[in-house]
Amino acid sequence: MSLPHAILTALLEKPSSGLELTRRFDRSIGYFWSATHQQIYRELGRLEAEGLIRVLPSEQPARGQKKAYEVLPAGRAELARWTSASQDPKPHRDAMLLRLRAAAVVGTAGLAADLRRHRELHERQLAEYREIERRDFPPGTDGPEDRLRHLVLRAGIDLETFWTQWLDHALAEFARLPDAGGPESPAARKA
Amino acid sequence: MSLPHAILTALLEKPSSGLELTRRFDRSIGYFWSATHQQIYRELGRLEAEGLIRVLPSEQPARGQKKAYEVLPAGRAELARWTSASQDPKPHRDAMLLRLRAAAVVGTAGLAADLRRHRELHERQLAEYREIERRDFPPGTDGPEDRLRHLVLRAGIDLETFWTQWLDHALAEFARLPDAGGPESPAARKA
DNA sequence: CCACCTTATGCAACTAGTTGCATAAGAGAG
DNA sequence: CTCTCTTATGCAACTAGTTGCATAAGGTGG
């Protein structure tokens, strides 16, 4: 139930068209709230119908024409309401941890390669975050809005650092396991 | 697409009924792959229809009667296949980070209290994980299966530690912000 | 013996997110 | 002028997860 609020935030930061929003979701906002262009268009339609946003009057678009939206006062109020309301954290789902647990039962064959691949992906993401930090938060950037946005980026950086290190730890553990097939290789079991 | 595999893993660890599975998902497995009882019953039905699990022959149940399942060889094979197959990490969604970013635009009013509440929740979860670690992984527990399961638990412990510390950091940052209403309090804007 | 509580299973409807594809305008190549 | 590529918007169908409620057996207290 947060995609509309993600869009409101993005539009308050800068009025945009659906495709522009999609691009921004692929970059900054999508790092902690991803969305596809179809989700975004559908949600823009709903938000407009509810009177929380409107099409920028300058543009009178037809299909295939850019159509930029801006947030109306009711939209800002709704975002403020949502931001301050108490919310329970959603339980996270992590397929890799599940696979590790499954591997304890059916064997670790083939898993190490994917652990290494994930490690690379997290490292690449980390490098991207660091680049954003260098670019957007040079020393002296410390207005209240900057501080909050930097705080969010720090969470991303620290999380990727965490996963990179944890995967290193996992790979080290794998190296110590008896054999490539793991505790019970599926082949050995199926005979 | 991982719930069936979570269930297969749980059933391989120990054949169980739907409700028993639900309880185990509330404890260990649910810490990284949560599921409600309705999801579990529905999925058990599907897995049985696909021939990956079967009802334990000892029990011939009617409605309201316990009905325990065990994994068939085809189920084990499918789990092994899924575990070893390469999978891309799903982008994570975190509402709290989104709220912080929204707060940079509409103001921080009311947010600090929920940050504190979340900190408490993460700390409580951390204590629970540590208790599980103490109970299930005493020194000397180091068979290959134990190592893998411990690795997964460590991820949980370290993640909760991470969030607790990050929230402390966020609260410290909040304390330094100009005022309770934040950079642009909604009230000030709406006038 | 029946009202109520707990354990246990399950259906139906809804919400959110994903995937695949369709439509349309404009720009450039031949 | 028309074919194709890019930009842009959007619908429809599907998959996954959530919420609300129904059903049924067995035990307990009055």
Image: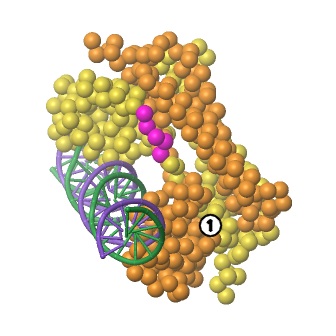
Chain colours: A orange, B yellow, C green, D purple
Q: Going 50% across and 25% down the picture, which residue do you hit?
A: A112
Chain part drawn in magenta: B86-90
| Numbered disc total | 1
The residue closer to the viewer here, B113 or A153, is A153
Q: What element carries label 1?
A: helix
Residue B41 image position (x, y, % from top left): 28, 43
The chain ID associated with circle 1 is: B
Residue B44 image position (x, y, % from top left): 27, 39
Residue under circle 1?
Answer: B102
In which quadrant will I find the N terminus of chain B? top left
Q: Going 61% across and 41% down the picture, which residue do you hit?
A: A124
Is D1 left, or right, of A131 in this rendering? left
Q: Would residue A11 be counted in the magenta stretch?
A: no
Q: Is residue A71 visible?
A: yes
Q: Going 33% across and 15% down the picture, which residue do you hit?
A: A187
Residue A182 image position (x, y, % from top left): 45, 17
Q: Quadrant of residue A84?
A: bottom right
The residue closer to the viewer here, B24 or B45, is B45
Up-down relation of residue A64 to residue B133 (above or below): below
The residue closer to the viewer here, B63 or B132, is B132
Q: Going 56% across and 62% down the picture, which residue do you hit?
A: A24
Up-down relation of residue C11 to residue A79 (above or below): above
